[in-house]
């Protein structure tokens, strides 16, 4: 594989990741809007089928929440919240603070 093909493959791979991230964000926005509407429906529902409608709305919210969590895990499977470089910087920062505290009064 030459350099041009490698660059093209990397570009396509990055473009696919961006597409997946965009779809997740759209799914998340739709989830918030749909959840708000379903919760509002729980507030205004009345009549003889009230219990059926409430159970249907709650089951939709539950399964949609599970699906959005699974979708998020798939999209962010290789992302770490706290990277190694962040841990190293924080450790170094705490060591400096400890050093400043101990040397300040000496």
Image: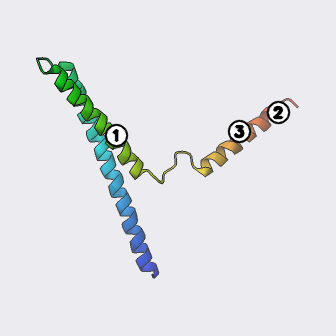
Where residue 19 appears, x then y in whole percent?
32, 57
Residue 21 or 52: which is nearer the viewer? 52
Of badges 2 and 1, the one in the foreground is 1
Q: CA distance from mark 3 to mark 1?
A: 38 Å
Toward which corner of the image does residue 61 lie, by quadrant?
top left
What residue does disc 2 label? 102
Q: CA distance from mark 3 to mark 2?
A: 12 Å
What residue does disc 1 label? 66
Where residue 95 appears, x then y in whole percent?
74, 40
Query: Residue shown at 33%/46% (left/top)?
Result: 25
Can residue 35 be seen here? Answer: no
Other-residue count near label 3 (Cα within 10 Å), few / some / many at <14 / 14–19 / ≥20:
few
Q: Point out the residue furthest to the top here.
A: 47
In the rendered structure, find residue 94 and report the number of the disc placed on it.
3
Q: Secondary structure at mark 1?
A: helix
Where residue 28 appears, x then y in whole percent?
31, 42
Query: Residue shown at 62%/51% (left/top)?
Result: 85
Query: Residue shown at 82%/33% (left/top)?
Result: 102
Q: Earlier in the sequence, mark 2 or mark 1?
A: 1
**Cβ atoms at labels 2 and 1 below 8 Å apart:** no
């Amino acid at each position: 594989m030459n350099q041009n093909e490698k660059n093209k493959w990397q570009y396509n791979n990055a473009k696919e990741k961006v597409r997946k991230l965009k779809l997740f964000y759209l799914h998340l926005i739709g989830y918030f809007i749909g959840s708000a509407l379903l919760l509002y429906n729980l507030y205004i529902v009345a009549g003889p089928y009230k219990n059926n409608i409430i159970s249907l709305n709650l089951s939709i919210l539950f399964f949609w929440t599970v699906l959005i969590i699974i979708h998020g895990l798939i999209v962010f499977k290789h992302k770490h919240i706290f990277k190694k470089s962040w841990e190293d910087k924080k450790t170094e920062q705490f060591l400096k603070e400890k050093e400043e505290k101990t040397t300040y009064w000496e």
